[in-house]
Amino acid sequence: MIYAVIIDIPEQNELSKKHCFGDCGKIICAGLNLGFGSSFICRIDQCPYEEKRTPEVGDLDGEPVVLRKLNELPEVKG
């Protein structure tokens, strides 16, 4: 599964800089645009900063792509 974080949305761009490039550091700095705006690619299934994700929006070389919305605070699981 490929998770795309849309960086054309200013809030998501800032959160990706803070969490994806900062806290996590595992974001793939490759551009992707499936018609929803410029995105960075992530392959981490369990992101603590994920607020929600879309159903599959397309594929990249046969691998499903979903859009991931980031949240300021990590998800607390109890």
Image: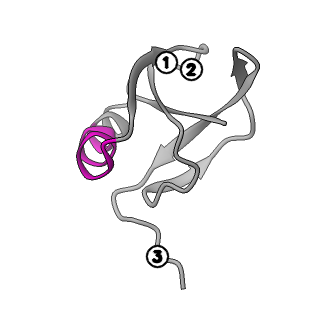
Label 3 Cα neighbours within 10 Å, binned few <14 / some 14-19 / many ≥20: few
Disc 1: which residue: 37
Identify the residue under disc 3.
76
Q: Nearer the viewer, residue 15 or 29?
A: 29
Boundaries of the magenta span: 14-25
- Which residue is under mark 2? 36
Q: What amino acid is found at the position of numbered circle 2 in the picture? A: Phe
Please state which of the two labelled residues, at mark 2 or mark 3, is closer to the viewer. Answer: 3
Q: Is 17 in the magenta? A: yes
Quadrant for the C terminus, please: bottom right
Q: Position of residue 62 (x, y in %)?
A: 76, 19
Is 12 on the left or on the right of 51, as rendered? Answer: left
Colouring scheme applied when the structure was drawn: one colour
Disc 1 marks which amino acid? Gly
Query: Residue 51: where, in percent of width, then height?
Result: 51, 56
- Is disc 2 in contact with disc 3, using a CB cutoff of under 8 Å? no
Quadrant occupied by the N terminus? top right
Taking 36 as reference, is 70 above or below it? Answer: below
Q: Residue at x 70, y 14 (%)?
A: 61
The secondary structure making up most of the magenta span is helix
Counting from the top left corner in percent of width and height, residue 27 is at 39, 35
Task: Give the quarter of the image for residue 39.
Answer: top left
